[in-house]
Amino acid sequence: LWFRILMKVRWRCRICLIVLSALLFASVFLHMQLISNNQPSLYGPNLLVKSFTNESIISYQGWWMSHARWGVASSCESNQDKCPHAYTAQCKMDGIKSLYQFNALSSETLIAGFTFSTFYSTHYMSIEQITEDSFVGVLILVKLQDFKVVQKRLPLPALNTDGELTDIIDLGEVRGVSVASVTVCLCCVGVEGLAKFWNVKLRPVAPSVGRLDRRDQYVVQCPKSLLLARQPDHIYSEEVILTPSGVLSSLVTLVIQMSIDRIDMLSLNAAVWNGPMSIVIYFPAKSTKDTEHAWKRKYVEKKLNQFRLHPYTHLTVVYAHSVLDAYPINALRNLAMKHVHTDYMLVLDGDFIVSPNFEASFQPAVAQTTSLLLPGDHVIYVVPVFELIADKWNSDQYVSPFFTKQELISHITQDDTDVFPFRSVASPLAHYSTNYSHWYTASVPYLVTDYRDKYEPYLVLKKTDGLPLFNEWFEDYGMNKVTHVMELWAAGYQFVVLPDNWAIHVPHVETKYAKTFLLDLDKRVKNRILRFEFITYLIAEYKLDECGLTEMKWE
């Protein structure tokens, strides 16, 4: 109708009508904008950022991955330059590939729920091998200020296809309680093939009146600690089996925690360690209520009679109360450290053998470290560790490890070597910062300068009142040693690598704790969230500057 009227009038009138129409449309548009701006915003902004966590600092900002690496690639097969970038993982049948983003949220902003969406693509998936434990998709875990947890598992609707995954996380049953944190995990387990995720969005649904359309109105950059407490309470029984005797004249105590199934490995260290020891042995329970410990004590005493331990040895046995108890690895370490009476302590696990004449090589390194002008109480010493290939392990052959550094290096450089830097394939960043290439030719101690957030060396610690202990919230497998190293780094300790000391990891049958952790996705996610919460503690405790996001551009 408007067009017909326009055609019937003179050309000058046509111009007037066009101008008046434009003004009318502009007025209506501005009016609608004013109305929109005065209405409460139901959906908030996307809380997820595209960047990866900066692994060279202590931070939880951005997407964080564990040792199983993720990459970035085009989201489509053709016209790749025009497609958005996607987070990609080569999924494996025998492991978990997971990518996490954790956000601490403001306690002042009430949230009724979240909407989630992501585009995905899965290709070359071997669906014939999929089991009921296989999973490709997203896990979302919301933790409330009262410590309740709301978890949502979102499997992809189909494999070997492209699509969009959407869902709503409704907090209706717990509405009125503010959200402490929300974690998104992109993951795949028990399946072989390539998975891609892009345009990943998590938007809060806010019941509050007023427009909250900025991410910083929800996300706290430098939050208070989200840990329940510094250390948890444990329920188990302790019994001292050995107490030290004789005169203490050593500089270093060997600290070892182990489960009872590895007690025979004590003989390996007893053959090469000629100093004091503090040992804690964990005895798992056989039932849901296991209180009979007399036979366990006799078993341990019978085994100890076969070893030649140093007279100044303290040994404690810890008895689990229930078959459901987790392995309290960090509590065991702290308990063993408690009974150290020397200036220094080498903290190892029971499946390692120390290098011969450890203290004789360690003493010169301590003296040489003074030339680096480092504060004595804030210097800790890194012990390079190596591993033997399981199918070449011979316990009779390796009762005594390599007697000199030259012998060890000569063995490593052989074409058919059976010795490698520890976890150099499975977890390359776990000991990357030790810089093994430097160590092979080093004759004096040297500083660790390239820190990574997955660094977990074995250490010689100076026993002081202010020394941070292992955090006992970490049980079983995952992040138990990494977080201790992280706190030492945050506290300003200097890491110095010992040039003439080392330890060898002895192959052994994989424990039930390791098997569970490798394939239990829920357990893995909760462990990683605990890591993020531990970082909030470090930020609050040590006033870390690096709590902002470090941008990482797409390659």
Image (cartoon, helix red, strand yellow):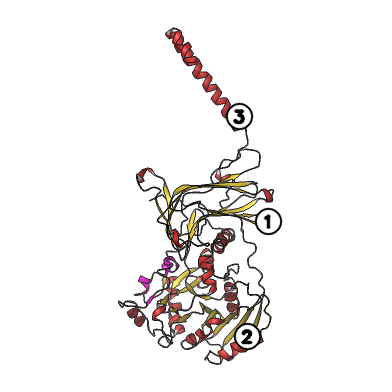
- Residue beneath disc 1: 146
Q: How many marks?
A: 3
Position of residue 179 relative to residue 239, above or below, is above
In terms of secondary structure, where does tag 1 sit? loop
- Residue beneath disc 2: 296
- Residue beneath disc 3: 35
Asked whether the viewer can see residue 204, the reply is yes
Q: Disc 3 or 2, which lies upstream in sequence? A: 3
Q: Disc 3 or 1, which lies upstream in sequence? A: 3
Q: Which residues are magenta?
A: 418-445
Label 3: how many Cα within 10 Å (few below 14, some 14–19, many 20+): few
Q: Alpha carbon of mark 3 to alpha carbon of mark 2: how far?
A: 75 Å
Quadrant housing residue 225: bottom right
Check disc 2 and give the amino acid type: Lys
Q: Position of residue 396 (x, y in %)?
A: 42, 88
Foreground: 152 or 433? 152
Residue at 63% x, 72% y: name it.
Answer: 325
Position of residue 31 relative to residue 339, above or below, is above
